Image (tube, coloured by chain):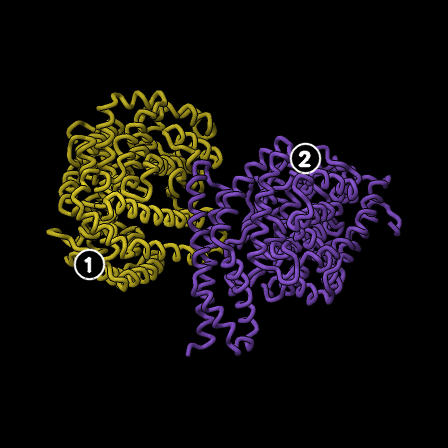
Chain colours: A purple, B yellow
Amino acid sequence: MTTTADLFVELVAILKKNALLASCGSALSWDEQTYMPPGGAETRAEQLALIAGMVHERATQPRVGELLSELEARVDIDERPDRSVVVREARRIYSRQTKLPQKLVEELSRTTTLAQQAWVAARKASDFTQFESWLEKILVLKREEAAAIGYGQGVPYDALLDDYEPGANAAAITATFAALRDELVPLVTAISASKKKPDTSVLERRYPMNAQQAFATQAARSIGFDFDRGRLDTTAHPFCTGLGPGDCRLTTRYNEQHFPGAFFGVMHEAGHGIYEQGLDAMGFGTALGETVSLGIHESQSRLWENLVGRSRAFWQHFFPAAQATFPEALTGVGLDEFHFAINSVRPSFIRVEADEVTYNLHIMLRFEIEQALIAGDLSTRDIPGVWNETFEKYFGLTPPNDAQGCLQDIHWSAGLIGYFPTYALGNMYAAQFFEAADRQLGGLFQQFALGEFQPLKHWLNQQIHSRGKRLRAHELVQTVTGESLSAKPLLRHLHARFGGLYGLSVES
Amino acid sequence: MTTTADLFVELVAILKKNALLASCGSALSWDEQTYMPPGGAETRAEQLALIAGMVHERATQPRVGELLSELEARVDIDERPDRSVVVREARRIYSRQTKLPQKLVEELSRTTTLAQQAWVAARKASDFTQFESWLEKILVLKREEAAAIGYGQGVPYDALLDDYEPGANAAAITATFAALRDELVPLVTAISASKKKPDTSVLERRYPMNAQQAFATQAARSIGFDFDRGRLDTTAHPFCTGLGPGDCRLTTRYNEQHFPGAFFGVMHEAGHGIYEQGLDAMGFGTALGETVSLGIHESQSRLWENLVGRSRAFWQHFFPAAQATFPEALTGVGLDEFHFAINSVRPSFIRVEADEVTYNLHIMLRFEIEQALIAGDLSTRDIPGVWNETFEKYFGLTPPNDAQGCLQDIHWSAGLIGYFPTYALGNMYAAQFFEAADRQLGGLFQQFALGEFQPLKHWLNQQIHSRGKRLRAHELVQTVTGESLSAKPLLRHLHARFGGLYGLSVES
């Protein structure tokens, strides 16, 4: 009889080979967005489709199903907990991929390709009605997808959410978001009412591109991104992508009249990159070497971007270097003035430009609407109205048009429903991890002021990155912080940082 | 019954899909040599091995053999000549790949990997004896390869040569090389004896890297390399690689104290690139959209690098721009002084640094030795002695050591036996094509002096590039120039250019 070990080795070999093939596609995608000449677009699309097709075919081959069933039936599989993890997560992927009828997959691919074009046009015309019928089609298909995947005792939305945040469910997120919103809305109101305002014009002086690049690279290196195993390049839309163990690529974009865009963009992507670089290379291709979820991934980027990168302590260390690098912009500017400017809070219409405080309200708005859409409680026709009403309630502002309202994001047109909440989950995880790290390591801000980021990076490596997917997001938070997910750490952080900057009284 | 068209369509679909997969490997190789961080090396090797293995597996699948046999048996295949070409060339590749026993392929791969390491160490120590046993092993395997491939009425060396120059044979090349050598050796002697010498120090002044890059890019664009379908980057070893239709990547390296290296390197690679860009995109993956041979490929690079790029007419057009771009180096330098400097001829030990005249003698030396090695007429032990004797005979110089002699090239350690002659074939094809173009288009040099390169580029597109692999190299030369391959056009060109520059009498 074949031993459990033999079966496991065969499964892992298939998984690893497929991950290696998929990583070739990642490299091609990176090239497409960085250096590929325009003439290469057509062939590149064919190359990527070929690799994606081969990866799908291999991932869903019947032998994988056989191996999983055999392994799941073995009583000795639990003797090695890591094997159980690999089998559990491989089953999760295999189930998702084999449960979806091929016809639905193709229909979704075709529809979202066309819907994205329609969305671009609709956004340009700022006319939601041009996009409405496409969204309606997508919702029908996503409901079919949810039904095919299944959602136990939950709601259809959970099945979609699970693709991005395995194990999460709408009910739990709703409760956490409610707790967050109850304190966020008054905080935003209090900040808006404050007489203290930062002078953000210091961030809009001349910041030469090469200097920005060198300075951001130095900061990314200081916090622990390893440039022997990664790079930083320039693209229209910033991203981070792992091309397999030892090779993680970050990108950003530069605006010579706006400092924060590229700098905090690099801090954000470097946070993602430090996570990728912290994965166990031996586990590549299996759950042991994979990231937990989009929410946990986002927690790593937001932690370095916001908790660390926008802290006063961080700039106690970096501001003298910034002044030396950008003398034209920063000579005569004080540390506190600069620090207040990079922490300016102002309700605004566009999510991707939002500050640390208002950002989460943008997410909640989308989360509420997409849940209602999937449940059938909201008709697509009513989206602009509901969007604007809710926006007014949260921000005290009404979007002037659809382009600055319900048409601003690409997600729905791309079929990414259930994706938005992971952004706000990431912010909450980040604050909760940061509090735990500060407790365990003691005085993080004092370390930052001295330019010491290694202890925090090492802690994240040990507590989060090296664990791979052994724990689901909620289990990881519980294990690492001793508590289940809560909005409180994020609220404590926001009150502490912005209460101080804006001179708010304690009760706000 | 399945129609010929059905069979043909099935074959082409397999070929195209496999070419697309192979092109993914080309993109990964390009990245490896341009932007990949050092930490990515291990994964990249695995990615490339995976793709190479899949390409080989698909190329040798039994269905390809069945389709080829079926198509070859069809009497109506000849009604469409292009179909015959595709089938003929697909058979050639399929035969080569299926004739080699898997064990031999693996043994060659393993041996050459280790042999290249041994060669690096031996060259460093300048000690051929350290490399000798490795070369001996490689020769045994390459003889096995030749026997497995077969070589009709010819010699085993022909089977190896055929991999790089389909349809060529050692006997014909030997005769052509002899005719070339008979005039080259006295020409080199006469040049060495000439009292006229160029002042090459003008090429060793300060040429800032960014200026070199901009200038070389401008020249490459002027001769017809399309930067909307290609790029130029920097690598340790310059190369040109096509990543599929619409995307061709060139690389070069810069030395701020040496102008010709990067500039003529870019002209050379752009010549390769113009060939790649001139292929029929619809024929991608089949013989209709593939280059003819290494020799024909090299003819395109050498034509633009030497026949065009080192001509006086080319610099009549470009020298004013060069002076404006490199004022520190070229102010006060005359066109003729500069032109003589870039055409300096001097016998030297290292092939890759050789000038246009002596280069071919370097090739002949290697061609003679590797033929004798494969035939068993020369023992590896005797290589350094034979190398140095022949070198003395051709160049009037004796290499001071093995590093500057028989250990200088990577080719033999990599198993590339039969590759060297294609370099000199390229030089001869280039001169022969250039003469024909000049005859047909009239006054090419007058056009160059006016900056007009489009007529020549267009002629090459039509006469050579767009034909794909419809004709073998010797057929192509006959068709395009009206004559079979001959050393005479190259000799006429060399006598004309260097006789003038060095003030030689007509009889030399």
User: Which of the labelled discs sits on residue A402, or is there none?
Assistant: 2
- What is the C-alpha distance between the residues marked 1 and 2? 70 Å
Q: Is residue A356 above or below residue A13?
A: above
> Amino acid type of disc 1?
Ala
Q: Which residue is mark 1?
A: B148
- Residue A109 appears at what percent x and percent y? 51, 46
Residue at (43, 39) in percent of width and height: A42
Identity of the residue furthest to the left in this view: B153
- Residue A183 appears at what percent x and percent y? 81, 51
> Amino acid type of disc 2?
Asp
Residue at (51, 65) in percent of width and height: A282
Q: Would you say B317 lies left or right of B398 here?
A: right
Element at badge 2? loop
User: In the image shown, does B316 or B280 lie closer to the viewer?
Assistant: B280
Q: Nearer the viewer, mark 1 or mark 2?
A: 2
- Residue B103 appears at what percent x and percent y? 27, 64
User: In the image shown, does A38 or B71 lie closer to the viewer?
Assistant: B71
